[in-house]
Image (spheres, coloured by chain):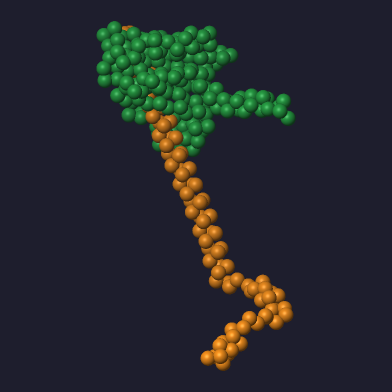
Amino acid sequence: MTALRPLAVVAAAVLLSAPLSAQQLKFNLDYLAAKASDSVDLSLNGATLQFAARFLSSKDADESKVKKMIASLEGIYIRTFEFKNPGAWTPADLEGVRRQLRGSEWSRIVGVKSGEEGENAEIYVRSQDKKIDGVAILVSSPKELTIVNIVGPVDLDSLASLGGHLGIPKVDIPKHK
Amino acid sequence: MDWLEQELKNSLARVDPPAGFSGRVLDRVGRRQPSPCRAHSRWLAAAAAVIVITGGAAAWREHQGQVAKEQVMLAFRIAAVKVNHIQAHIQESAR
């Protein structure tokens, strides 16, 4: 009986860790919250998304769009910080996240650097079997830090089409020929 | 005063109950049925408890659902704002 105990412990650990494994990017930046004037921490796993979907109205245009988008998602993990003064965070704080994004499964599709504002924005996609199964968005400026990880088949066009909805101003993007 | 003492002693002397007395008492107690009114009030209390628990659970579930919905909407708002912001930068640099 005692010989089975280690196996039971391992099995319990695997079962407990299963819901956490959906998150593709690990970011532990809790220590920055104390320095931030405003911060958001959202960890929504698949079960929470599907539960929330039941409360999203199909009649409301915004909620209906979001409801469709979350149907196939496995999780949304977001950490944002806003600081009153620049220099509250350093590039070293992001290094752990960047190291994970250097993995072969991730590829950067967009990188924007604004010299004037010191802003840096990147979008990475994670693909498996030629299908997108995750997106990471990194936006940083001297007074802001945002990390987004959407787990599952994400349609970036649908996400972008939320512009003009949810109180987000619409940005018209010229189509490439 | 001897006669008075004697009378008191006689009156207050311990007298054992007749044989089978305790058995008959217990038998009567066992046969007594609860009144219909008491039985009703028990059922009413149980029903009220079930209604309160069920209603409370439904209200809690509704509240949790609304919280989850708000969180999802906030998550999409943040993600969409960032994607739109990046697109705006691309648009600017393309000009």
| Quarter assignment of residue A94 | top left
Q: Is residue A96 visible?
A: yes
| Quarter assignment of residue B32 | bottom right
Across and down, in percent, residue B90 comes to 35, 11
Vertical relation: A40 (above or below) B29: above
Screen quadrant of the C terminus of chain B: top left
Please state which of residues A27 and A76 is positioned toward the viewer in this rendering.
Answer: A27
Please state which of residues A17 and A144 is positioned toward the viewer in this rendering.
Answer: A17
Residue at the image point whose x is 42% and y is 37% from the top: B67
Across and down, in percent, residue B9 comes to 59, 85
Residue at the image point whose x is 53% and y is 66% from the top: B41
Q: Is residue A173 visible?
A: no
Residue at the image point whose x is 46% and y is 44% from the top: B60
Vertical relation: A33 (above or below) B16: above
Vertical relation: A68 (above or below) B82: below
Q: Which chain is green?
A: A
Q: Which chain is orange?
A: B
Across and down, in percent, residue A85 comes to 26, 17
Please state which of residues B88 and B46 is positioned toward the viewer in this rendering.
Answer: B46
Total number of numbered discs in the rendering: 0
